[in-house]
Amino acid sequence: MRKLFFFGVLLIITSCATEKLNLSPLSNNFYSETKGSDSDRGAKKGFDINIKENINASEISNLISTFPKFKNNDLNEEVTSLKYSLQNYLYAIDANNSAGKNRAIKSFEKSYKKIQKLRQQLDKDDDEVLNRYLVRLKTNISVIEDSLKGN
């Protein structure tokens, strides 16, 4: 009986210890009070994606938090705008806000185009780093958008 109890406690401890840390800027209950049940939403079509458990959303959150600073101040300001657009995009999906998601995508695209123009002033190394981040962001957004359209 003691061995069974010991293994049960050991199993509980190891299962709790192996949980991954959530570094997403979206808290677990950010919209819990504002989200209604399906009957509260009526005929509104919601997103069938759990943004807190989506690996692409987590990757976007990580990219937002690790985005490097550059010597060009105009570029840094536009990167900040791009980050806000991405955060708004994730919040809008989490809140099932289709109009907010579309606004965030348009804002992201606008900042992305400005950043592409400002890239011409960067040295080769900074340009490669920036390009790597931008490609990863676009790829993750595309995967999320494809999954939303597939519903």
Image (spheres, grey):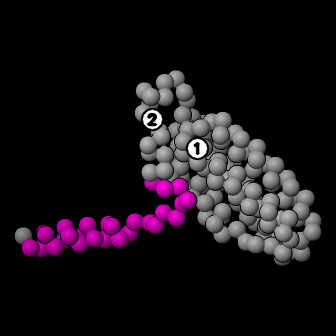
Q: Is residue 21 above or below residue 137?
A: below
Q: Secondary structure at mark 1?
A: helix
Would you identify the image quadrant in which residue 124 lies?
bottom right
Would you identify the image quadrant in which residue 33 lies?
top left
Q: Amino acid at mark 1?
A: Ile
Residue 40: image tag: none
Q: Which image quarter is the C terminus in?
A: top right
Residue 139: tell me if it is visible: no
Q: Is residue 3 left or right of residue 126?
A: left
Choose mark 2 or mark 1, whichever is in front.
Answer: 2
| Percent of width and height locating residue 46 | 54, 34
| Percent of width and height locating residue 67 | 70, 68
Q: Residue at x 55, y 38 (%)?
A: 96
Q: What span is in magenta?
A: 2-28
| Percent of width and height locating residue 76 | 79, 66
Residue 36: image tag: 2
Structural distance between the alpha carbons of marks 2 and 1: 14 Å
Residue 17 located within the stretch drawn in magenta = yes
**Residue furthest out toward the left:** 1
Q: Residues within 10 Å of mark 1 (few under 14, many from 20)?
A: many
Q: Amino acid at mark 2?
A: Gly
| Percent of width and height locating residue 135 | 75, 59
Q: Which image quarter is the N terminus in?
A: bottom left
Along the line of sight, the residue nearer the viewer: 71 or 22 = 71
Residue 93: image tag: 1
Residue 107: tell me if it is visible: yes
Which numbered disc, 2 or 1, marks the residue that appears first in the sequence?
2
Residue 16 located within the stretch drawn in magenta = yes
Q: Residue at x 75, y 50 (%)?
A: 108
